[in-house]
Amino acid sequence: MPKKNSLKEKLRTIVFEANTPLGLHFDQVLIFAILLSLLVVVLDSIESVSKNFHTELSFFEWFFTALFTAEYLVRIYCAPNRIKYVISFFGIIDLIAVLPTYLALMFPEFHALIDVRTLRLIRIFRIFKLTQYMSEYQHLADAMAASRRKILVFLSVVLMVVMVMGTLMYVVEGPAHGFTSIPVAIYWAITTMTTVGFGDITPQTDLGKLIASVMMLMGWGTLAVPTGIVTAEMSYARRPRRVDGDRACLTCMRDGYHFKDRYCSSCGSPLPPPD
């Protein structure tokens, strides 16, 4: 265990604790850097901009790569369990944020085999780094995780409905009206229930139009169900149970835990003892 006032402990507080003044400034700087690096990626995809400002874009790309590399190494150094951090979701995202630039530098022969933009566009995954610095993302992720069973049940019901209705439309309309197979009819049922309605396949018979009308009306209610499930879980998660929490998981960096919480709800790691 590092000493309370050691350099490692101080760095860990800044890097992993978002509820401290220095930790807050650290997160704000990184959010700004991530957004600017994404702007560089977008500008680099514009042929005229990339051609006229190639040197400047390359400079900024290497600057941000060096910055995120330093951050990644500091996080490995400060993490109490380095292996868990490296293989965690945020650890993998931190690695993906810097890997493409180094791959293009170390393997020029690989660089020549594929379109350079394919390799560069992997840098867009840096946007996922934002999720570890904004508590709103964490609340949404918690709500999605808590409601996953209800959503799976809901999706299974939707799947049964589209299979039944699609098969029925295949029987009613048939290949003569574009419903050449049951999978094609299920595709039509999905686009109709989700209110997308591409119009590439349309019913021609009166019975088929009646079935399509029922599917459209069902689609209105269907789209509202998962929204209500996730919203209810988000409301539950924002109850005072964890609002006053100031503890953070040292493995996945999720914060906001109450002093009574013992394990991280995201990665299952033991939480540090309360001060």
Image (cartoon, rainbow, N blue to C red):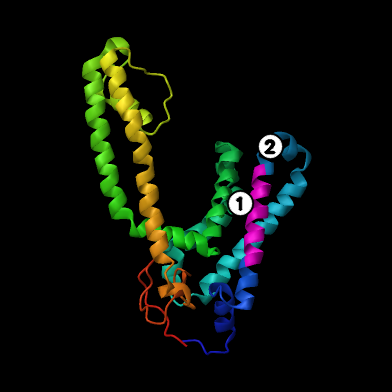
Crowdedness of circle 1 by 10 Å Cα count: few (<14), some, many (20+)?
some
For mark 2, what is the residue?
46
Identified at 36% across, 75% down, the residue is 263
Horizontal relation, residue 212 to residue 137: left or right = left
Outermost top residue: 176
Amino acid type assigned to the residue bearing label 1 in the image: Thr
The vertical placement of 129 against 75, above or below, is above
Identified at 72% across, 53% down, the residue is 60
Residue 101 percent across, percent down from the top left: 61, 51
Q: For the residues marked 1 and 2, what is the alpha-carbon distance in whole angstroms?
A: 18 Å
Horizontal relation, residue 74 to residue 82: left or right = right
Number of numbered discs on residues: 2
Amino acid type assigned to the residue bearing label 2 in the image: Ile
Q: Magenta region: which residues?
A: 28-42
For mark 1, what is the residue?
101
Residue 226 percent across, percent down from the top left: 36, 47
The mark nearer the N terminus, 1 or 2, is: 2
Identified at 29% across, 20% down, the residue is 210
Horizontal relation, residue 37 to residue 264: left or right = right
Among the 4 quarters of the image, the one containing residue 165: top left
Crowdedness of circle 2 by 10 Å Cα count: few (<14), some, many (20+)?
few
Identified at 70% across, 58% down, the residue is 63
Among the 4 quarters of the image, the one containing residue 11: bottom right
Residue 60 visible, this orientation: yes
Q: Nearer the viewer, mark 1 or mark 2?
A: 2
